[in-house]
Amino acid sequence: MRLLKFGPLLLMGLLISGIQGCSSPETDPTTPTATPASDTAEDHADAKSPMDKMMPGLKELSPQDYKSAMAQHICPVSGEMLGTMGAPKKVDVDGEAVWICCDGCKAKLLAEPDKYLAKLK
């Protein structure tokens, strides 16, 4: 009976947490997958490499920030490649510049900095 009272609140909380922040990919975009034998090089002529996907958002950064973000490569919170969701955001964590893919990752990074900084080492 009490579950029925809290059910809508629980559902709303799950919905909000699903909307906020980044979604992790189900597969690693850098891992090659098997392609059917019918695929040809012409079929993939316009296919972009992971680095090409990363570039559009990074091009918006200053040369110094671009170099720093390229050195980090991924968002420690979501695991997404920096620049794939627009220009990455720089966050100061204990005097260290850390790049994240979007504003949704900032609260998580600042709440548990040691956890996410360990992923960058």
Image (cartoon, rainbow, N blue to C red):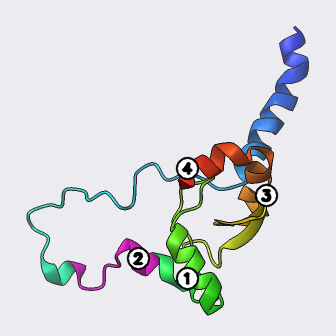
The earlier-in-sequence mark between 2 and 1 is: 2
Q: Which mark is residue 3?
A: none
Q: Which residues are magenta?
A: 44-53
Disc 1 residue type (three-letter): Lys
Residue drawn at x 78%, y 33% as measured from the top left: 11
- Could you tell me residue 1's position as x and y percent? 87, 8
Kindly report the distance in space between the C-alpha atoms of the residues bearing marks 2 and 1: 14 Å
Res. 40 image quadrant: bottom left
| Residue contact between numbered discs 1 and 3, judged by CB atoms under 8 Å | no
Q: Which residue is mark 3?
A: 94
Residue 46 is covered by the magenta coloring: yes
Q: Which residue is mark 2?
A: 51
Q: Which residue is mark 4?
A: 119
Disc 4 residue type (three-letter): Lys
The earlier-in-sequence mark between 1 and 3 is: 1
Asked if 89 appears above or below 61 in the picture, the reply is above
Q: Is residue 20 visible?
A: no
Per the image, label 2 sits on a secondary structure element best described as helix
